[in-house]
């Protein structure tokens, strides 16, 4: 079946966001379309404020924060992310079905779920290849399901087409979701639009949701909207995050759980 233009443009925007710059000829080869089609899509994306066209291709907008590889993110503030992961994992009951998002903090959640030997009947659905591999040591205690979709190398994530379609057919007890920004008005956002769309689909498929976000996310707002703090039952964050996000969470009726740093002898990443 031929890809819809909107889906193709999202793939093109993701290529530009991932590399910072893409040549028209390279994009045409990777998307399997003509250069004329790519130029038309770039014009539409530029009109929407998504990128800037330059000679021979397109680049990200100046001043726009660049997405980093999940491995690099995991090394940054690793102790904080482990603590948040442990706090979030402690909220998961045995026998639950959960959606587990991509990203370095959700990877810490996966590690802490595996470490909980009291969990024996857990169904985990994820769109993250790295998350699935981190959960693999807990099989067969856990049932691990991968959504399928188009691979994004930076986060080892699976996005549309297919990912949201899979999620639309599910209803789970709990979703654990990460983000790149929690604005002062409670908007929860992400740098990357394809991943933001999948995160929003996770919210819609869950009976309840936990947001995991450290203090670096506080006050930030990015292109892709996931939802608002009002869509989450609980925000798990560190102390700096609690200081900066308590008012927005209270206004939204979202509970805050503060994760302390692990002991110095805690296991390393």
Image: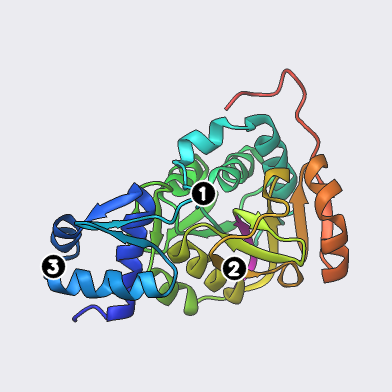
Magenta span of residues: 172-179
Main SS category, magenta section: strand
Residue ID at (44%, 69%):
49
**Circles 2 and 1: CB atoms closer than 8 Å:** no
Q: Is residue 16 above or below residue 230?
A: above
Q: Nearer the viewer, mark 2 or mark 3?
A: 3
Q: Label 3 belongs to which residue?
A: 35
Residue 230 in the image: state x and y as whole percent. Answer: 76, 72
Tag count:
3
Report which quarter residue 222 is drawn in.
bottom right
Is residue 108 in the magenta section? no
- Label 2 residue SS: strand
Q: At x 39% / y 48%, what residue is drawn? A: 156
Residue labelled with disc 2: 226
Categorize mark 2 by other alpha carbons within 10 Å: few (<14), some (14-19), many (20+): many
Q: Is 177 covered by the magenta stretch? A: yes
Number of the label disc, if any, that sits on residue 65: 1
Circle on res. 167: none
């Amino acid at each position: 079946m031929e890809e819809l233009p909107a889906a193709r443009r999202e793939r093109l925007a993701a290529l530009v966001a991932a590399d910072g710059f893409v040549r028209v000829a390279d994009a045409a080869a990777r998307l399997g379309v003509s250069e004329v089609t790519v130029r038309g899509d770039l014009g539409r994306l530029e009109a929407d404020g998504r990128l800037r066209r330059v000679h021979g291709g397109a680049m990200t907008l100046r001043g726009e924060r660049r997405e980093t590889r999940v491995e690099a993110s995991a090394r940054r503030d690793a102790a904080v992310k482990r603590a948040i992961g442990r706090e979030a994992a402690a909220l998961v009951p045995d026998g639950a079905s959960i959606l587990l998002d991509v990203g370095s903090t959700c990877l810490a959640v996966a590690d802490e779920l595996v470490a909980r030997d009291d969990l024996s009947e857990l169904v985990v659905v994820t769109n993250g290849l790295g998350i699935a591999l981190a959960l693999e040591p807990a099989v067969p205690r856990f049932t691990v399901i991968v959504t399928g979709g188009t691979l994004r190398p930076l986060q080892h994530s699976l996005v549309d087409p297919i990912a949201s379609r899979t999620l639309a057919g599910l209803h789970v007890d709990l979703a654990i979701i990460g983000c790149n920004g929690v604005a002062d008005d409670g908007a929860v956002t992400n740098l990357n639009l394809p991943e933001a769309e999948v995160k929003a689909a996770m919210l819609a498929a869950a009976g309840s949701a936990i947001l995991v976000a450290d203090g670096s996310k506080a006050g930030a707002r990015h292109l892709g909207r996931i939802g608002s703090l009002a869509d989450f039952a609980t925000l798990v964050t560190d102390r700096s995050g609690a200081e900066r996000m308590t008012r927005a969470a209270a206004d939204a009726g979202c509970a805050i759980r503060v994760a302390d740093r692990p002991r110095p002898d805690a296991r390393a990443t």
